[in-house]
Image: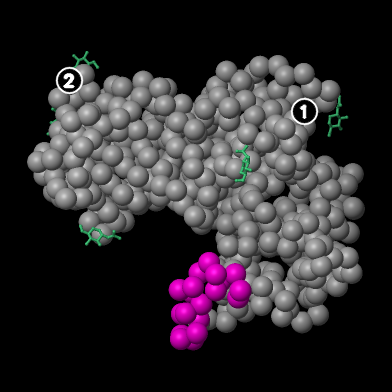
């Protein structure tokens, strides 16, 4: 394979990671230099016109049709959840819990977050979200309390059968399952604790007002704590070169920190930025079983990582014949490397001087691998480069809070590109941009399988053809349509429960 690039300098005695696709990268560099003085493609920072037909409306309540429980003190019991995963899974879990509490006429206890040894963050609900705002905002919908009543606190929930785990309620369970299996426990014991609760509630079928409540929770009831909002506002201000304009999006993300003037030497009303979520951390890379051009060193390093962190995978690999790395790549099953992301952006027409915010944790291959993208796009920034060490310090040990800062920067970006359409973070950001964007906040979502089928020709393809084919693929994913049945309302809120069409 003749596409490795050997570079001499090494960090910490390790050999640098060779970059793939050097031929195409050279063509891209040339094309970007040539395009410098040409105008940008006219729809680069835009969504199709009919995106403006959808307006947020999940804040509108109409419980009359389906009964009215909130004002009464009556409750069928208390629901506790312990959400697993990182901040994004937690968010989904919270809103599913809100929905189920309403369905069962139950009182919700402020959700708890399980400590995960992947995310290593002890943050609880109140460290990330405004607790009182959440309770108050949802008051017409459900009753939420901070703690279980004293008389229930001493119960041994496991012994009385009130602990419910993933085995008891399957993934994306229908509401009727909850009524059938959970309600009796609730009525008998007055309390149910869901442990490891996540995506346990189906998207369809579900009553209209309950779906709307789930949207309301995600898009309106959850607000970051002031500490996160304030630093998020600082990030957005530095990215835009001016303070964030007050808009429904900024109001939701930044609260009163939006529109507040923070002295800044560099005000430029016209500066746009692109945010990119590069999901290329070592866990993702190792888990994918793909090959990224790094030869024996890479293979050994990733195998070692798998042995430590994914022993089950190592075991399967030993005993079963798995698809080859080349096959996985051709099927679009590999995370996009930074160089692949850079090529995609160049093909779409982003200029060399575009400001690009990179979200995500440590990129596998580090600075060296990032060089491939920064050679094409020198104006790359991250939260680590935009914020001073002392501004970052309060967040340093809290991966969820750092992810919240990335969330704010990506949701506020003039354009957002993801490299992994399966990522929960990217999905939530996309949903936010759809909901609050008014048709002005485009999201670029590659079809990885089709992109792989173009990239496999990297040695022979001409730049023009590469550009044409990538653009076609991106245009298709930009199309505006209603949420397909059973798809996530968090990722795709364009549906009557969450957003209202203004043309009928
Ligand atoms: C429903 O609740 C509202 C207050 O949230 C109250 O004004 C109204 O009377 C209630 N309706 C019924 C039918 O109980
Ligand atoms: C919840 O309360 C409403 C209104 O009182 C009632 O119609 C519904 O049957 C109750 N559901 C459950 C599961 O208790
Ligand atoms: C889930 O609960 C059931 C009993 O309801 C128990 O048999 C099972 O071991 C539990 N599973 C986990 C993963 O804790
Ligand atoms: C604002 O930024 C654009 C592009 O970065 C630049 O061309 C323009 O000169 C800047 N304007 C001011 C007033 O700084
Ligand atoms: C972060 O964790 C390290 C090691 O556990 C500790 O020394 C440091 O004080 C912590 N910093 C903050 C801001 O909590
Ligand atoms: C680049 O082309 C070579 C030769 O056809 C191929 O083996 C390799 O998989 C391609 N790289 C990518 C990232 O698709
Ligand atoms: C938006 O327009 C495209 C074509 O321009 C069409 O295919 C699509 O169905 C439209 N979507 C909606 C929701 O009207």
Can you say whether 343 is above or below 354 in the image?
A: below
| Residue named by callout 2 | 72
User: Label 2 crowding class (10 Å Cα cut-off): few <14, some 14-19, many 20+?
Assistant: few
Instruction: Give the quadrant of residue 379.
Output: top right
Quadrant including the N terminus: bottom right
Left or right? Give the position of 401 relative to 231. Answer: left
Q: Nearer the viewer, residue 479 or 88?
A: 88
Can you say whether 365 is above or below 237 in the image?
A: below
Left or right? Give the position of 481 relative to 375. Answer: left
SS at badge 1:
loop
Residue 196 location, x and y as percent? 35, 51
Name the residue located 64 percent from the left edge and 29 percent from the top edge.
231
The residue carrying mark 1 has its beta carbon less than 8 Å from ligand 4: yes
The residue carrying mark 2 has its beta carbon less than 8 Å from ligand 2: yes
Residue 312 magenta-highlighted: yes
Can you say whether 104 is above or below 249 in the image?
A: below
| Residue named by callout 1 | 241
Q: Is residue 443 visible to the viewer in this orientation of the structure?
A: yes
Name the residue located 89 percent from the left edge and 69 percent from the top edge.
8
Per the model, the C-alpha gap separating discs 2 and 1 is 50 Å
Can you say whether 307 is above or below 236 in the image?
A: below
Mark toward the viewer: 2 or 1:
2
Quadrant including the C terminus: top left
The numbered mark, 2 or 1, whose residue comes first in the sequence reads 2
Left or right? Give the position of 469 relative to 423. Answer: right
SS at badge 2:
loop
Name the residue located 36 percent from the left edge and 24 percent from the top edge.
135
Instruction: Give the quadrant of residue 459.
Output: bottom right
Q: Which residues are magenta?
A: 303-321
Left or right? Give the position of 221 relative to 45. Answer: left
């Amino acid at each position: 394979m003749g596409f490795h690039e050997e570079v001499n300098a090494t960090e910490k005695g390790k050999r640098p990671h060779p970059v793939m696709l050097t031929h195409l990268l050279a063509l891209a560099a040339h094309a970007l230099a040539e395009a410098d003085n040409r105008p940008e493609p006219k729809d680069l920072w835009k969504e199709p016109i009919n995106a403006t037909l959808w307006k947020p409306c999940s804040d509108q309540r109409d419980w009359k049709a389906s009964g009215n429980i909130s004002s009464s003190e009556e409750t069928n019991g208390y629901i506790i959840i312990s959400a697993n995963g990182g901040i994004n899974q937690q968010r989904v879990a919270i809103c599913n819990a809100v929905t189920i509490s309403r369905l069962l006429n139950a009182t919700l206890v402020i959700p708890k977050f399980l400590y995960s040894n992947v995310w290593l963050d002890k943050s609880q609900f109140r460290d990330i979200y405004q607790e009182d705002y959440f309770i108050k905002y949802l008051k017409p919908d459900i009753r939420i309390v901070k703690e279980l009543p004293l008389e229930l606190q001493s119960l041994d929930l496991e012994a009385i059968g009130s602990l419910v785990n993933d085995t008891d309620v399957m993934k994306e369970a229908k509401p009727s399952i909850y009524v059938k299996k959970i309600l009796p426990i609730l009525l008998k014991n007055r309390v149910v604790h869901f442990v490891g609760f996540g995506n346990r509630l189906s998207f369809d079928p579900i009553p209209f007002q309950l779906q709307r409540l789930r949207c309301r929770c995600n898009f309106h009831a959850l607000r970051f704590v002031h500490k996160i909002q304030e630093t998020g506002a600082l990030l957005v201000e530095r990215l835009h070169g001016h303070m964030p304009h007050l808009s429904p999006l900024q109001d939701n993300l930044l609260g009163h920190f939006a529109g507040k003037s923070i002295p800044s030497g560099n005000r430029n009303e016209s500066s746009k930025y692109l945010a990119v979520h590069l999901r290329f951390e070592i866990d993702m890379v190792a888990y994918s079983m793909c090959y990224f051009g790094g030869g024996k060193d890479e293979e050994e390093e990733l195998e070692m990582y798998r042995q430590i962190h994914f022993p089950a995978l190592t075991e399967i690999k030993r005993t079963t014949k798995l698809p080859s790395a080349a096959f996985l790549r051709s099927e679009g099953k590999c995370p996009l490397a930074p160089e692949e992301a850079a090529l995609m952006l160049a093909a779409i027409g982003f200029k060399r001087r575009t400001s690009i915010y990179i979200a995500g944790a440590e990129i596998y291959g580090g600075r060296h691998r990032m060089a491939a993208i920064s050679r094409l796009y020198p104006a790359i920034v991250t939260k680590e480069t935009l914020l001073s060490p002392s501004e970052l310090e309060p967040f340093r040990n809290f991966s969820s809070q750092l992810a919240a800062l990335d969330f704010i920067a990506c949701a506020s970006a003039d354009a957002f590109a993801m490299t992994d359409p399966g990522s929960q973070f990217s999905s939530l950001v996309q949903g936010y941009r759809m909901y609050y964007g008014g048709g002005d906040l485009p999201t670029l979502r590659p079809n990885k399988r089709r992109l792989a089928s173009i990239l496999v020709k990297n040695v022979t393809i001409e730049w023009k053809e590469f550009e044409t084919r990538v653009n076609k693929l991106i245009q298709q994913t930009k199309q505006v349509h209603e949420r397909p049945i059973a798809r996530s309302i968090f990722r795709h809120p364009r549906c009557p429960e969450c957003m209202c069409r203004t043309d009928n």
